[in-house]
Amino acid sequence: MPPRRDPQKHAEVLDAAIELIRQKGIDGTSLQDVADAVGIKKGSLVTYFSSKAELADLIQARFTEVAEQELAEIAGREGLNPEQRLRELLHFHAEHCTVRLSSPVLVSFMQLWSAPGTPAGRKQLEIRRQYQQVFEDAVAECSRKRIFRKVDPELVVNGLMGAMSWCAFWYEEETHGPLRPLVDSLIDMSFVGLRPRPRRAAASSQT
Amino acid sequence: MPPRRDPQKHAEVLDAAIELIRQKGIDGTSLQDVADAVGIKKGSLVTYFSSKAELADLIQARFTEVAEQELAEIAGREGLNPEQRLRELLHFHAEHCTVRLSSPVLVSFMQLWSAPGTPAGRKQLEIRRQYQQVFEDAVAECSRKRIFRKVDPELVVNGLMGAMSWCAFWYEEETHGPLRPLVDSLIDMSFVGLRPRPRRAAASSQT
DNA sequence: GTCTATAAAGCGATAGAC
DNA sequence: GTCTATCGCTTTATAGAC
């Protein structure tokens, strides 16, 4: 399990597996596919992981590790006001979902997240909670600085992350062009609804 | 394939399959599971569908049929202004994703939606396009009536539907209470960002 | 460390008796 | 319409030679 002799080859195998699962999902990817992709025989994969479940764990660990590192970097970056920080966090999340994960992988994550019974599912749930907490803290900070009005951070983040995550299911670079300006537009529209109300606002659809 | 003698039993089998797929996803559900759930032998399932692919088609057809009926009902309902109509459409979508589909089923839909190469995938893509078109029309109508400013309906709908669909991944009735007020809050916040700008608005984070 | 070979299990699909 | 039985295939996992 630990990369004993050849960590580079370990990374190569993992990269190939990630790319395949990115395209076809975890269920649609067999160990034979992985072996073919790296040019070794199926039986030799045991050198790099002892089971398919462990492969899935390794991939998930890598993704969440990357995500947490980037989130921590943004959270600690200098020279950003709270709104810009939240914006950067949302940009990262959108890109993480669309470019790096792709919808099949996102879907696999979701499936694990929605199986909280298993130990792995519980662990995933905790990771997701931590991940989301960073966003909720950023929203709360915006409220504290009167950039946003007082809002429920959990609800707001669920809405924002939904809009961002959903990009994985509709965004295509050839059709829509670069992702960033699209996401910026979405964020702009969303943030307007979070501003402090000058006199009154937001109320309009009372039946 | 057509329910020749016992349409009730057909519906029962389909219900059981839906419930299983709701829990474990399409790949995680074997025909043996379905047969066990309805108390017949695996081989007897051919009476109700000739292959697993056809089972998936039947389930998808049922869901999309229900969705299209409801959407048409809302689109044609009397006494709603364009904003209220859009709001009702979004409410339906949120409930459709959370309560009726649940995240694993939504996830299965996504998986099929993201395989546009196959004929079935192409058909699903067209269904989704039609489905989404109803929402985009509603947004465009709001813009025409100056309830919203001029916006890109596709982008706006993608953002709104993302926030709604995402509810399937975080909403739990025991934790959060009734779904409707939560969704209303999300819609309220989003709509504020779509209003015509009185003088200037929305610009605040220019670096 | 990689290979061949195979075990063991589960899958969807099908044939034929009742 | 349902059953039993089985086929053919794919999958993961493992054992042992080089």
Image: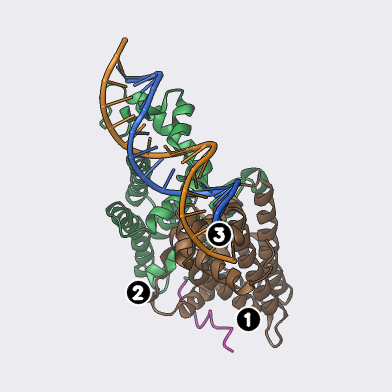
Chain colours: A brown, B green, C orange, D blue
Residue A123 visible, this orientation: yes
Closest to the observer, B157 or B127: B127
Residue name at image x 66 percent, y 63 percent: A132
Give the spatial CA distance, label 3 vs label 2.
38 Å
x then y, percent, for residue B169: 57, 53
Label at residue A45: 3
Give me the residue at 31% from left, 60% from top: B117
Marked residue nearer the N-terminal end (3 or 2):
3
Is residue B200 magenta-colored? yes
Rendered location of residue B53, percent (x, y): 34, 43
Residues shaded magenta: B195-207
Q: Are marks 1 and 2 on the same chain?
A: yes
**One can see residue B184 in this view:** no
Residue B145 position, x and y percent, is 36, 67
Horizontal arrangement in the rendering, residue B161 relative to residue A87 (left or right): left
Give the residue at mark 1: A84
- Give the residue number, with chain letter if any, for mark 2: A175
Q: Which of the chains bears the disc numbered 2?
A: A
Q: Nearer the viewer, mark 1 or mark 2?
A: 2
Nearer to the camera, A135 or A41: A41
Amino acid beneath label 2: Thr
